[in-house]
Image (cartoon, grey):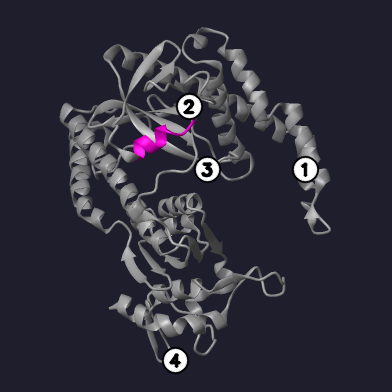
Amino acid sequence: MGKSTTPSFILELGLKVKAHEEAFLNKRFEVARQLYNACLSEAKRRLSNLRQSKEFQKARKMPKTVNGKSNKERTEAFKALNAKFGFSEYNLHAFVTQIRNSWISNHIDGTTAQKIATRAFKTVQCLAFGQAKKVRFKGKNQLKSIEGKTNTTGIRFSDAGYVEWNSLKLRCIIDVNDEVIVHGLSHPVKYCRIIKRIVNGKVRFFVQLILEGKPFIKEKNEPSDNIVGLDIGPSTIAAVSGKHASLERFCDELSLKQKKIRRLQRALERKRRANNPQNYNPDGTIKSGKKSWHDSKRYLRTNTKLAEIQRKLAAHRKTLHGNLANRILRQGKHIKTEKLSYKAFQKNYGKSVKDRAPSMFMEILRRKAENAGGLVNEFSTKETKLSQYCHKCGKYTKKPLSQRVHRCCKLNLQRDLYSAFLAGSIVEDPTPSRGREYLDTADVSKRWRSMETILQRAVS
């Protein structure tokens, strides 16, 4: 959805690209990469100068709040600093306009250059706000997308089914029998984005149309106006609504492909060691310092095969997440779940999170719920402590992670399912003494009469 005032959705179409058109596109992607790196370097330089100033140290020491409200004086001090050192999105637009008045203007138009500058500024802004420790410059062939600002200048889509960008005119692959594509093309285009992907070792180009309106929803995926409680884990998800309860693993179908990936990775390592014995110590460890690597044709073919499998795996994972989100929304579009730290998941359960991607699922679910007029409400685990609570006795008992079954007051339920059931009764409390959200115990007791059998059936 982004910051736009109108709802938006994306329609992706393939592009028919001839050899000379592919050469043009590759050249423009390379120019865009250099432009992005130049903007990133300039934004970093301005941020560094800002942070070294005495005014910054003075503004940083000001209290963030005064009488429970944000300190306006501190905010104004930082605004003045940003203006003084030119650290803003519009200042970077002026910078990119200045450097574009050269050979770059033959390849990149003004609006596209401004969008590249915006992208670089937002990256450095994460560094300024402490949301990132460092920023990365784009290496060769690492820039995978270029987008415009409007559909009137720069990269634009015509009703005739072409994408036009300066002298280029690229034909889109449109299936008139696909109801999703027909629905998308009936909406006005806000702007376009060209995507570059490697498919089976070959470069393919796609266009993403950012359209005004709401995406197509199939009749079988029509969401219901009910409440669903979720409990998300590194590899599992429990969902409980008024008439349904389920506990399943994320992307369980993908586990069979991991063995093939591991075999290819081992084959790559063997080939790499065989081709570069000078870079390894007698004990098998890699030598320190600068090294040159030689990759054989067999190594490159194996690497291409591995990249294609991982690309298909990522696409299949996204499809499975979308199907799971649709099944949950059919139960209810008002989602209640605990607010989790997915970075902590990555640190503690790295391999499982890499394969299952629970954070990606939540992003897909959130987007689909908002498009359907629903909402994903994430509440604090510190205040609710659902995994420790028993609604029969009203007591909180800490459980180790290894204990996957809730046993208390003659209850014998799978822990995640029980937490998902309780999540459906979380309500907001306007009184600050009880916290922002709390568990409505009366609602839990009322729902338990009809849900006990359903939860037991889900466990079995």
Earlier residue among tags 3 and 1: 3
Earlier residue among tags 4 and 1: 1
User: Looking at the rendered structure, which numbered label has been put on residue 129?
Assistant: none
Earlier residue among tags 2 and 4: 2
Earlier residue among tags 2 and 3: 3
* Foreground of the two, 36 or 300: 36
Write down the quadrant of residue 100 in the picture: top right
**Residue at disc 4, secondary structure:** loop
Q: Which residue is mark 1?
A: 75
Badge 2 amino acid: Glu
Query: Could you say where residue 75 lies in the image, as x and y percent from the top left?
Result: 77, 43
Query: Could you say where residue 193 lies in the image, as x and y percent from the top left?
Result: 44, 28
**Mark whose residue sits in front, 3 or 1:** 3
Q: Are marks 2 and 1 in contact (CB under 8 Å)?
A: no
Q: Are marks 2 and 4 in contact (CB under 8 Å)?
A: no
**Residue at disc 2, secondary structure:** strand
196 in magenta: no
Residues shaded magenta? 180-188
Residue that appears at 54% across and 31% down = 119
Residue that appears at 34% across and 48% down = 318
Residue that appears at 42% across and 82% down = 450
Query: Could you say where residue 451 lies in the image, as x and y percent from the top left?
Result: 41, 80
Q: Which residue is mark 3?
A: 1
Residue 273, above or below 358:
above
Write down the quadrant of residue 11 in the picture: top left
Q: Which residue is mark 4?
A: 409
Cα–Cα gap, marks 2 and 3:
16 Å
